[in-house]
Image (cartoon, rainbow, N blue to C red):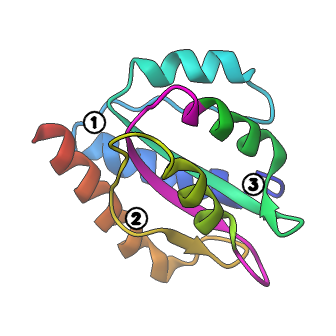
């Protein structure tokens, strides 16, 4: 997260998932080595990626992690994108992750226009409900 907005949305979603009884682990790709995140991803049934649109692409540390994820075929995924003028990171992340065998996206992209607006809390509730329901199956 360049300015902390995707991180804030991820923290809100994590709290909502915890309220629904889901165990959550979070990692910041800008400070945690990708191999640590990848190792934890193997032990997780569901993944949520939140990234800033950066130079019309995905923020570089997230993009590198996504390449690693694609090479290891992890499957249940949700996406949060951020961008002030032209958020494209969600579309790009979905395109990259669609290369996974049996990839299954949970819910729609949540799009932040700079920062999380109070009106978007319902979108995070919907995403948390979808993830929790899928986990509890």
Q: Around disc 2, counting alpha carbons within 10 Å, would you say few (fewer than 14), some (14 to 19), or many (20 or more)?
A: many
Q: Quadrant of the C terminus?
A: top left
Counting labels gives 3
Badge 3 marks a residue whose secondary structure is loop
The residue under label 2 is 124
Between residue 31 and residue 34, name the one nearer to us. 34
Instruction: From the viewer's perspective, tell me whether residue 65 is left or right of residue 19.
Output: right
Question: Which tag, 3 or 2, sits closer to the chain's start?
Answer: 3
Q: Around disc 1, counting alpha carbons within 10 Å, would you say few (fewer than 14), some (14 to 19), or many (20 or more)?
A: some
Q: Is residue 9 above or below residue 112?
A: above
Query: Which numbered dot is residue 22?
Result: 1
User: What span is in magenta?
Assistant: 69-87
Q: CA distance from mark 3 to mark 2?
A: 17 Å
Instruction: From the viewer's perspective, tell me whether residue 44 is left or right of residue 37.
Output: left
Question: Which tag, 3 or 1, sits closer to the chain's start?
Answer: 3
Q: CA distance from mark 1 to mark 2?
A: 14 Å
Query: Which numbered dot is residue 32?
Result: none
Query: Which numbered dot is residue 4?
Result: 3
Between residue 96 and residue 36, name the one nearer to us. 96
Question: Which of the 4 image quadrants contains residue 116?
Answer: bottom right
Between residue 115 and residue 104, name the one nearer to us. 104
In the rendered image, residue 101, in percent from the top left (x then y), is placed at: 39, 39
In the rendered image, residue 96, in percent from the top left (x then y), is placed at: 60, 51
Q: Is residue 84 above or below residue 95?
A: below
In the rendered image, residue 119, in percent from the top left (x then y), is placed at: 47, 83
């Amino acid at each position: 997260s360049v300015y902390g907005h995707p991180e804030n949305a991820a923290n809100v979603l994590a709290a909502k998932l915890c309220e629904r009884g889901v165990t959550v682990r979070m990692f910041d790709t800008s400070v945690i080595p990708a191999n640590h995140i990848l190792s934890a991803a193997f032990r997780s049934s569901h993944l949520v990626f939140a990234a800033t649109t950066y130079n019309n692409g995905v923020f570089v540390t997230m993009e590198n992690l996504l390449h690693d994820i694609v090479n290891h075929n992890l499957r249940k995924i949700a996406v949060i994108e951020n961008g002030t003028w032209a958020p494209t990171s969600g579309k790009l992340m979905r395109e990259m992750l669609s290369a996974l065998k049996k990839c299954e996206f949970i819910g729609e992209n949540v799009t932040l226009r700079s920062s999380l607006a109070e009106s978007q809390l319902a979108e995070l509730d919907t995403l948390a409900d979808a993830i929790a329901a899928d986990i509890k199956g």
